[in-house]
Image: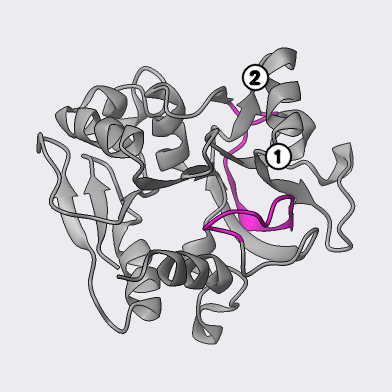
């Protein structure tokens, strides 16, 4: 599998993502791609990692969405490529129009840096096939603008098409207002594009891929990816 990680000024989670990808790829390091590039090398997967691209000025991800490289990322996605956006990467994907909706300020206007639980809402995808339906996993939250918003028509379409990937939940799997850390509508933590080749999520699965990191609940995602995209 050939993976590339896009770097913007302010990106700070690229090494975590590279470690996760290399772990499941036999040590093969992903390519780092600067945001001013106008083309991509031959790749199977493009990753937009977490951080604070361009200092989160304007709206989170808004300036990064206009970077030269994003035209190439859009072409890659429209040509059937797989794109993963985590945290700031999810924000960029919505700002670029590759995923619907928007990420707003957290309810309560507090930055969240903590562990939290998710339920896996959809296993029929390249990214989630190594999870089981409704499996409860523990992940890391590190965001100030993770409150997913979309109009009711869009939300109903996402639900009806099985495009909700993850929901915020309690340790027992309960999906309630009390288990929603940031105010996201319908507890949505991650969504797919209509062809399920693009995934955006706010939590950081790359932070839990080894027992030495404190957990391995993120590892099945990366195992799923490499198995699905292995040349």
Q: CA distance from mark 1 to mark 2?
A: 16 Å
Q: In terms of image quadrants, where is residue 181?
A: top right
Magenta stretch mostly in which secondary structure?
A: loop
Q: Over which residues does the magenta segment extend?
A: 105-128
| Residue neighbourhood size for the residue with mark 1, other residues' Cα within 10 Å, grouped as few (<14), some (14–19), many (≥20) | some
Q: Which residue is mark 2?
A: 150
Badge 2 density bin: few <14, some 14–19, many ≥20, Cα 10 Å? some
In the rendered view, does 116 fall on the left or right side of 186? left
The answer to whether residue 85 shows anywhere in this view is yes
Q: Residue 78's x, y, as percent?
A: 34, 32
Q: Position of residue 183 (x, y in %)?
A: 73, 31
Decide: is 197 above or below 14: above
| 110 lies left or right of 46 | right
Say whether residue 212 is left or right of residue 41. right
Q: Secondary structure at mark 2?
A: loop
Residue 14 shown left or right of residue 93 in the figure: left
- Residue 128, given in percent of the width and then of the height, sits at 60, 60
Quadrant for the C terminus in the image: bottom left
Q: Which residue, given by chain and number where applicable, does mark 1 sit on?
A: 162
């Amino acid at each position: 599998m050939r993976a590339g990680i896009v770097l913007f000024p302010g990106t700070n989670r690229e090494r975590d993502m590279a470690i996760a990808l290399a772990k499941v790829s036999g040590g093969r390091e992903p390519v780092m791609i600067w945001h001013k590039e106008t083309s991509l090398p031959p790749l199977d997967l493009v990753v937009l990692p977490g951080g604070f691209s361009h200092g989160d000025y304007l709206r989170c991800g808004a300036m990064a969405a206009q970077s030269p490289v994003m035209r190439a990322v859009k072409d890659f996605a429209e040509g059937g490529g797989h794109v993963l956006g985590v945290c700031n990467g999810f924000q960029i994907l919505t700002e670029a129009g590759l995923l619907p909706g928007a990420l707003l300020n957290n309810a309560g206007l507090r930055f969240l840096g903590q562990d939290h639980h998710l339920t896996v809402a959809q296993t029929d995808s390249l990214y989630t096939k190594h999870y089981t339906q409704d499996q409860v996993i523990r992940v890391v939250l590190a965001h100030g603008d993770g409150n997913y918003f979309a109009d009711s028509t869009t939300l109903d379409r996402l639900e009806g098409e099985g495009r909700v990937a993850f929901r915020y939940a309690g340790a027992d799997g309960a999906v309630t207002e009390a288990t929603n850390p940031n105010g996201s509508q319908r507890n949505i933590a991650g969504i797919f594009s209509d062809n399920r080749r693009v995934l955006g999520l706010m939590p950081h699965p790359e932070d839990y891929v080894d027992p030495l990191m404190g957990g391995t609940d993120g590892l099945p995602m990366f195992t799923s990816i490499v198995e699905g995209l292995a040349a």
